[in-house]
Amino acid sequence: MIPRYTRPEMARIWSDENRFRTWLAVEVAATETLAEAGLVPKDAAHAIRERADFRVERIHEIEAEVRHDVIAFTTAVAEIVGPDARWFHYGLTSNDVVDTAQALLIRQASQVIAQDLQRLAEVLERRAWEFKDTPMVGRTHGIHAEPITFGFKIANWYSETQRNIARFIAAAEDMRVGKFSGAVGIFAHLTPELEEKICARLGLKAAAVSSQVIQRDRHAHYLGTLAVIASTLDKIATEVRHLQRTEVREAEEFFSEKQKGSSAMPHKRNPVTAEQISGLARVVRGNAQAGFENVALWHERDISHSSAERVILPDSTTLVDYLLNKTTNLIDTLFVYPERMRANLESTRGLIFSGQLLLDLVEHGVSREDAYRLVQAHAMRAWKENLDFHQLVLADKEITSKVPRQQIEHAFDLPRQLKNVDKIFVRVFGRKGASTTKGTKVHEGRPQTPARPREGAGKASRKR
């Protein structure tokens, strides 16, 4: 049963029809290579190329009796090919076909995921530039810390996505291997040279050494990389969930006019997409653990990994494809509230500049211990009595006698805190401006409502 979150391309890749078609492609490539080497009659290889086919229903019928999927597959093909089928699967063991075909299926799935990652990166880049200069408070431990910009926050997600792209390319390439080394990997019936030729025919590399199976550290690495990607998406979704909290409300996931948030409370606008992303990311991480367990097999092979992989490989690639598109759409259509960001930034009445004031006192000859004592005393009073920290500092003669008023005012200067944002963006994106935002005028206030989002796409919300 294909999960309902499966997108059409992934559903096609992991369908029984495509899986058996890929097995057939491996078998034909092996037969033709062996025919070129004189191990299989060329007319038999030609007949197999021309006539080899199957019906999925027939394979399942045979498997119900023999309880072996590859034998069911080869029998179903032989029924159609006829006498020349005696050369079909010649010199091979089941996992020569299954593991090599699985590499091809993962390559197909990886191409989809690579495109998804690139689309996410493009949306993150565009929205990072859109909000590059939109100030908001940075939070550590959930508590107001120092100023940042919303674009800076998104740039961090973009940079992490770029690392995920690099990791994924490496993990997918590590999976691009086949094997035709036989029942225990010792090439009792074929040769390493033939293996290399068959793999090359399929666009794969030959594993340098294998047992009956390709070693599962590769699969663990691949599944682990998918789990890291899912964790990044969870990180983004979790941040959106925090920013959407009523007390914060600095950003909000798309909410359509007809959407409903609660069966009991008509006012609710819940971050359901972000919560779904966080929830399903846990499944991908759980699947990675099964991948790690699959590395340790008995001797040259057992099948404890096989049953797990029939679930975790299709599910993990399918889930990551789905989650990448969900996250791309989430960011693409995100409502952003700059005025609320500014209000929250200013809500502690200057406390977020305490670190700069501490440094200014030190620069003017005050010991760090005394400077910290002076600044913290006013900060704690401002917290407890809901007073203006800036004004408390200006009224303290011990501070004003050490630091000129102009310097104190400069300590509370927001642009001073954000002066290196442009340099960070150059480091992240490699240039000083984003062509994707050229000509876009962004204003403070409520964003316009974007068009209803499609899966994996949507018109970006803008500040207005």
Image: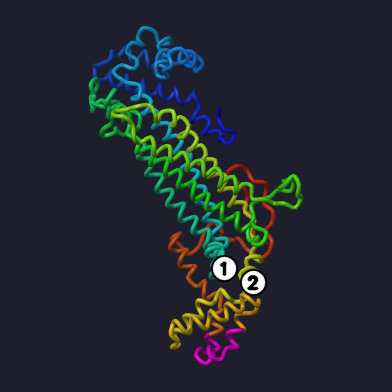
Regarding mark 1 in the picture, which secondary structure is present there? Answer: strand
The Cα–Cα distance between marks 1 and 2, rounded to whole angstroms, is 10 Å
Instruction: Quickly name the residue at label 2.
Output: 347
Q: Quadrant of the N terminus?
A: top right
The answer to which of 57 and 1 lies nearer the viewer is 1
Which colour scheme appears in the figure?
A: rainbow
Which of the 4 image quadrants contains residue 368? bottom left
Indicate the amino acid at tag 1. His
When asked about the image quadrant of residue 292, the answer is top left
Q: Is 46 inside the magenta-drawn segment? A: no
Q: Is residue 310 above or below residue 413?
A: above
Indicate the quadrant containing the C terminus: top left, top right, bottom left or bottom right: bottom right
393 in magenta: yes
- Count how many numbered circles sit on residues in the image: 2
- Residue named by callout 1: 144
Q: Main secondary structure of the magenta part?
A: helix
Q: Nearer the viewer, residue 371 or 206?
A: 371
Q: How far across and down, in percent of the image, does residue 96 sit?
A: 33, 25
Left or right: 39 as drawn, with respect to 21? left
In the rendered image of this protein, does residue 274 appear above or below residue 304?
below
Q: Which residue does the image show at 29% across and 29% down from the upper left?
A: 299
Please provide the residue range marked out in magenta.
Answer: 392-407
Residue density around tag 1, few if under 14, some if 14–19, many if 20 or more, within 10 Å: some
| Residue at x 49%, y 49% (from the top left corner) | 231
In the rendered structure, the answer to whether residue 36 lies left or right of residue 256 reads: left
Residue 133 placed where, x, y %? 56, 67
The tag on residue 129 is none
